[in-house]
Amino acid sequence: MSQLTPASNSTGDGVPASGRRTLDTLRRSMRGWLNFKVGFAILVLGTFTIFALFSPWIVPHSPDRQDLMAALTPPQYFSGPYFLGTDHVGRDILSRLIYGSRISLLIAVVVVVISGVFGVGLGLISGFFGSWIDFAIQKLVEVFWAFPPLLLAVTIVAFFGQGLGVLIIALVVQRWIPYCRVTRANTMSLKEREYVLAARSIGASRTRIMVKHILPNLIQSSIIIGTFAMASAILSEAALSFLGLGVPPTIPTWGAMLNDARSYMSTSWWMPLFPGACIFLTVLAINMLGDALRDQLDPRLKRSGARG
């Protein structure tokens, strides 16, 4: 008489079936992040973040120390004290680049956070309540959207004067609009979903529905918008600093370094090259990270199989 044996719950290699499914799910979820775009973005942004956080201990020289005897020294790399050379008044370019990363990343993060909170809040209110509230908020959007972004920022800085706070306000003035428009559209769709209607039927308040049921579903799109907004904020800050309307001249920034290099581009190539390269690499890395986040978080791309 044959004896029945229970079905095995493990695969051929001895790994339990549940564990195998978990590993497969983890592998599929990580596959989209293990690519060149993400690796390049993490390397570049991680490097500049370390520079920004630990710049006082990393810089070889004071970024404001002038040495007219060493003015316009070309890059010496490992053969001298000035690795990337000096500017027209003898300030070390490498030290100024490292300190400049603090301003660029600080402005980018603060602008994105303030714009996101303000834009998502207005978009959520506009899309949820509709009626005259939606009309008023959308008219406000149209008023601010009518001005060219850089021209509006230049006007604000020129009127209120130079300063880090004024510069952040000038960059926030229009960057909340994409958050507001996308959030409004998503909210108008989400408030008609079954789980929102069920919450209403059991007596949930409007505030609870907005905070508990709708807002969590807006985070993914807001993260994607914020990533690209960081790149835009860095470019705008560099443009304003290049025009002499950014932070005060005593604070080293990449845009201000480009402004200083305008008269020396034909004779001292290293002065515009290195700050321009920092801006280019940072913006490129942020855009690559934004592409990767969009591919992973956008459900429409997941359904269409368009992920890279």
Image (cartoon, rainbow, N blue to C red):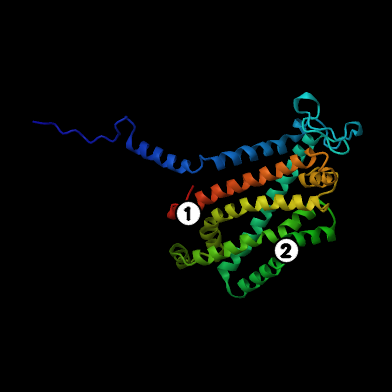
Q: Position of residue 270 (x, y in %)?
A: 78, 38
User: Residue 148's mark?
Assistant: 2
Viewer-proximal residue, 290 or 70?
70
Determine the residue positioned at 59% across, 46% down. 288
Viewer-proximal residue, 275 or 57?
275
Other-residue count near label 1 (Cα within 10 Å), few / some / many at <14 / 14–19 / ≥20? some
Q: Is residue 226 above or below residue 253?
A: below
Q: Which of marks 1 and 2 is nearer the N terminus?
A: 2
Query: At numbered mark 2, what does the secondary structure look like: helix, strand or loop?
Result: loop
Q: Where is residue 16 in the image (x, y as percent from the top left)?
A: 33, 34
User: Where, quadrant-wise, is the N terminus in this rendering?
Assistant: top left
Determine the residue positioned at 47% across, 57% down. 300
Q: In this view, does 75 lie above or below 199?
A: above
Q: Going by the picture, which residue comes out furthest to the bottom?
A: 132
Side of 131 where 236 appears, left or right? right
Contact flag, marks 1 and 2 (Cβ < 8 Å): no
Q: Image quadrant of residue 129?
A: bottom right
At label 2, the amino acid type is: Pro
Q: Going by the picture, which residue comes out furthest to the left?
A: 1
Determine the residue positioned at 73% across, 56% down. 171
Measure how far apart labels 1 and 2 are at the Cα level: 31 Å
Q: Image quadrant of residue 97?
A: top right
Determine the residue positioned at 68% across, 39% down. 48
Side of 188 where 84 appears, left or right? right
Q: Going by the picture, which residue comes out furthest to the right?
A: 68
Query: At numbered mark 1, what does the secondary structure look like: helix, strand or loop?
Result: helix
At label 1, the amino acid type is: Leu
Other-residue count near label 2 (Cα within 10 Å), few / some / many at <14 / 14–19 / ≥20? few
Q: Which residue is disc 1 drawn over? A: 301
Q: In this view, does 30 lie above or below 116?
A: above
